[in-house]
Amino acid sequence: MSLSGLFNARWPGVALFDLDGTLVDSAPDLTAAVDQMLAHLGRSPAGIDRVRQWVGHGSPILVRRALAGNIDWEPPRSKDDALFNDALNIFYHCYGQINGQHAKVYEGVESCLYRLKEHGCRLAVVTNKPEQFIAPLLKRLHLDHHFDIQIGGDTLPQKKPHPSPLIHAMEELGGTRGTTVMVGDSDADVSAAQAAGIPCVAVRYGYNFGKPIDALGADAVVDSLAELL
Ligand SMILES: O=C(O)COP(=O)(O)O
């Protein structure tokens, strides 16, 4: 399925991209930061296989899951809240230092972004990652020049799967529901796009909380963004 196939043989005017698991494999850096945080708290490391499944609902929920050692963290008791606040601060400090060191741009991403730009498409990052970490990561991986706007998980009052970050980015870039596409790797992305009324492309190589993405009802599912060209 090509991107123009989603828009009656025209290219989209606006493309919204998820970051972690879609543009960039950031799991090695996130794992290093989670494991450093756990070590500070005297706990054993989580490891990349678990962290990969915990990414996608933003850093506070990643830290909750790491403290619980499980994707289904329990709502905190007040005692746990102090621990959580400490853990989140430690995680932010560690991740700020590691962000981008081991992260890799997925195959097919650069060619897709260049081709969209050539066709006059305006591009946004719409991620649940805290805003402070987006620009340093994009810059380090030489992706920053592609994007007209970057929306993080704490940029607006709501984050994905709420549709508002997608609608906000679309409107800022002059897009409409008939000219905008969302590209993501997880249920949070597909659900947000569906709630926003925007077509969605899902990638199979990302995280999606450790589950397959094919059955979520995305308009197209691909193994590489190069398939969209
Ligand atoms: O949860 C995160 O920190 C990042 O998630 P996203 O880039 O897949 O939205």
Image (cartoon, rainbow, N blue to C red):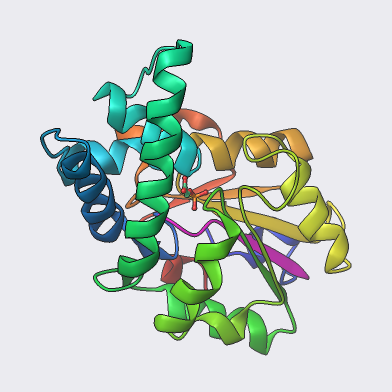
Percent position of residue 49, x then y: 17, 41
Residue at image coords 54%, 56%: 18
Q: Is residue 50 left or right of residue 225?
A: left
Say if 78 sits above or below 200 in the image: above
Where are the magenta residues, as a range?
Answer: 13-20
In the image, is 19 to the left or to the right of 170? left
The percent coordinates of residue 64 (x first, y second) are 39, 29
Q: Position of residue 41 (x, y in %)?
A: 22, 36
What residue is drawn where x is 37% and y is 28%? Answer: 83
Picture coordinates of residue 69, whole percent (x, y): 24, 25
Along the viewing direction, whichever of 168 and 220 lies nearer the viewer: 168
Question: For residue 207, which quarter of the picture?
Answer: top left
Q: Is residue 148 magenta?
A: no
The answer to whether 226 appears left or right of 30 in the picture is right
Q: Nearer the viewer, residue 4 or 139?
A: 139
Residue 15 included in the magenta stretch of the image = yes
- Is 11 above or below relative to 18? below
Identity of the residue drawn at 75% across and 70% down: 10
Q: Is residue 67 left or right of residue 20?
A: left
Say whether residue 19 is visible: yes
Residue 106 seen: no
Determine which quarter of the picture holds residue 117: bottom right
5 w.r.t. 38: above or below? below
Q: State the residue at coordinates (68%, 42%).
A: 193
